[in-house]
């Protein structure tokens, strides 16, 4: 359980979710997003890779410190195979990418509503209480069947489960779910952005 909490905390704290939501919402409300209309790249992709570059470095640094600290607390380490550790890091990075896209979507809701901050507050509390602190196995069977379709499975539970109980079949299952989730969330973000910029009126320079 200690190792599970360590990995979920690493993924959650390596991403500045509030800042991402605030920056995207600021771009929308302030009109800065208009400057991206003639750029040869997607705004959603720009946010994703900008934040992913920052969060991956934070994750790797924190992971080294976290593994050492947790080892001294528990006296053992679930993963000693270097190849398995690399696969777990890949899953963690996919979890980061999905989380960043979710934050971007919450920020892009500013196209539709005045303040998207309450949606981030609800999401963050949901993830902390269910995704970070408690594994899916803690919940009734009927709830587990629902939770595997939520962001919890692909952003926190999956990578953490691999770290405490690694198996190649589990890795393939979780990563395929993450890839599928990534494309669905990216598609939603792209559609929300395109829908919003169609209503954008740019006056002057």
Image (cartoon, rainbow, N blue to C red):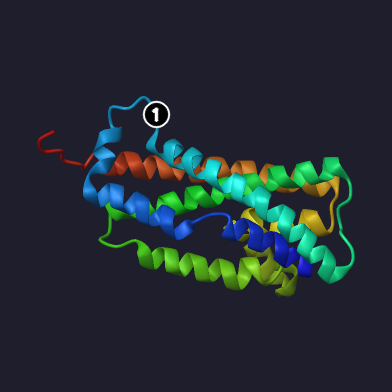
Q: Kindly tell me whether residue 181 is visible in this rendering.
A: no
Residue visible at 89% across and 67% down in the picture:
75
| Rendered location of residue 146, percent (x, y) | 63, 64
Under circle 1, the secondary element is loop
Name the residue tied to disc 1.
41
| Rendered location of residue 196, percent (x, y) | 28, 44
Q: Quadrant of residue 192?
A: top left
Residue at the limit of the structure toward the top, as seen here: 40
| Rendered location of residue 152, percent (x, y) | 62, 60
Residue visible at 38% across and 41% down in the picture:
191
In this rendering, would 12 be left or right of 83? left
Q: Quadrant of residue 78?
A: bottom right
Q: Kindly tell me whether residue 14 is visible in this rendering.
A: yes
In this rendering, would 22 be left or right of 180? left
Total residue callouts: 1
| Rendered location of residue 125, percent (x, y) | 51, 71
Asked whether 193 or 31 is in front, the reply is: 31
Asked whether 131 or 60 is in front, the reply is: 60
For residue 121, above or below residue 176:
below
Q: In which quarter of the image is residue 77?
A: bottom right
Mark 1: give few (<14), some (14-19) or many (20+) Cα within 10 Å: few
Quadrant holding the N terminus: bottom right
Residue visible at 50% across and 66% down in the picture:
124
Residue at the limit of the structure toward the left, as seen here: 204
Quadrant holding the C terminus: top left
């Amino acid at each position: 359980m200690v190792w599970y909490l360590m990995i979920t905390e690493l993924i959650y704290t390596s991403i500045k979710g509030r800042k991402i939501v605030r920056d995207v919402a600021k771009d929308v409300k302030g009109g800065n997003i208009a400057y991206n209309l003639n750029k040869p790249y997607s705004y959603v992709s720009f946010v994703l890779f900008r934040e992913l570059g920052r969060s991956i470095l934070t994750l790797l640094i924190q992971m080294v410190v976290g593994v050492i600290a947790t080892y001294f607390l528990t006296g053992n380490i679930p993963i000693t195979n270097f190849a398995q550790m690399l696969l777990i890091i890949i899953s963690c990075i996919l979890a980061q990418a999905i989380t960043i896209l979710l934050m971007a979507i919450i920020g892009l809701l500013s196209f539709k509503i005045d303040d998207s901050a309450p949606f981030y507050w609800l999401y963050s509390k949901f993830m902390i209480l269910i995704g970070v602190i408690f594994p899916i196995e803690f919940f009734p069977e009927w709830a587990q069947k629902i939770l595997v379709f939520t962001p919890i499975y692909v952003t926190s539970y999956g990578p953490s489960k691999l770290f405490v109980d690694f198996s190649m079949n589990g890795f393939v299952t979780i990563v395929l779910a993450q890839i599928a989730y990534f494309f669905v969330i990216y598609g939603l973000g792209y559609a929300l952005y395109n829908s919003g910029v169609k209503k954008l009126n740019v006056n002057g320079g």
